[in-house]
């Protein structure tokens, strides 16, 4: 399989599968360098999203107002 074939196959993956692929590649590279990756390659990693950021900011503001 050529690099071009691999790139074509990667384009067909979902966004989440692409993140998982990158995570696995980084873990493999780290292992080849004989270093410990900063994460468990078998554990799912969460990521931050701005989707609920406004609600979180309002909740934090209310909590601080109650304490202060």
Image (cartoon, rainbow, N blue to C red):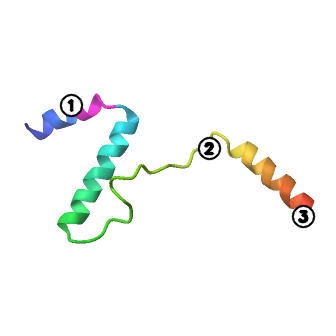
**What secondary structure do most residues of the magenta stretch adopt?**
helix
User: For the residues marked 3 and 1, what is the alpha-carbon distance in whole angstroms?
Assistant: 55 Å
Secondary structure type for disc 2: loop
Q: Residue at x 26, y 71 (%)?
A: 35
- Above-or-below relation of 3 to 26: above
Compared with 36, 12 (above or below) is above
Residue 57 horizontal/vertical position (percent): 75, 50
Q: Taking 5 as reference, is 53 left or right? A: right
Mark 2: give few (<14), some (14-19) or many (20+) Cα within 10 Å. few
Q: Which residues are magenta?
A: 9-13
Residue 50: mark: 2
Earlier sequence position, callout 1 versus callout 2: 1
For the residues labelled 2 and 3, say whether their Cβ atoms are less than 8 Å apart: no
Q: Residue under label 3, please give it.
A: 67
Residue at position x 33%, y 55% in the image: 41
Q: Toward the viewer: 9 or 43?
A: 43
Kindly identify the residue that appears in the image at 17 percent across and 37 percent down: 6
**Lower sequence index among marks 3 and 1:** 1
Q: Which percent across, then down, holds residue 16?
A: 40, 38
Above or below: residue 17 compared with residue 27: above
Q: Dot 1: few (<14), some (14–19), or many (≥20) neighbours within 10 Å?
A: few
Circle 2 or circle 3, nearest the eye: 3
- Residue closest to the far front: 42
Q: Residue furthest left?
A: 1
- In this view, the residue farthest toward the top is 12
Judged from the image, the secondary structure of the residue bearing numbered disc 1 is helix
Residue 37 picture quarter: bottom left
- The residue singled out by tag 1 in the image is 8
Label at residue 25: none
Which element carries disc 3, helix, strand or loop?
A: helix
In the picture, the quarter occupied by the C terminus is: bottom right
């Amino acid at each position: 399989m050529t690099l071009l074939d691999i790139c074509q196959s990667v384009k067909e993956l979902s966004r989440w599968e692409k993140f998982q692929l990158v995570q696995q590649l980084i873990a493999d590279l780290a292992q080849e360098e004989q270093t410990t990756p900063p994460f468990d390659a078998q554990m799912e990693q969460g990521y931050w999203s701005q989707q609920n950021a406004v609600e979180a900011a309002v909740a934090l503001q209310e909590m601080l107002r109650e304490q202060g």
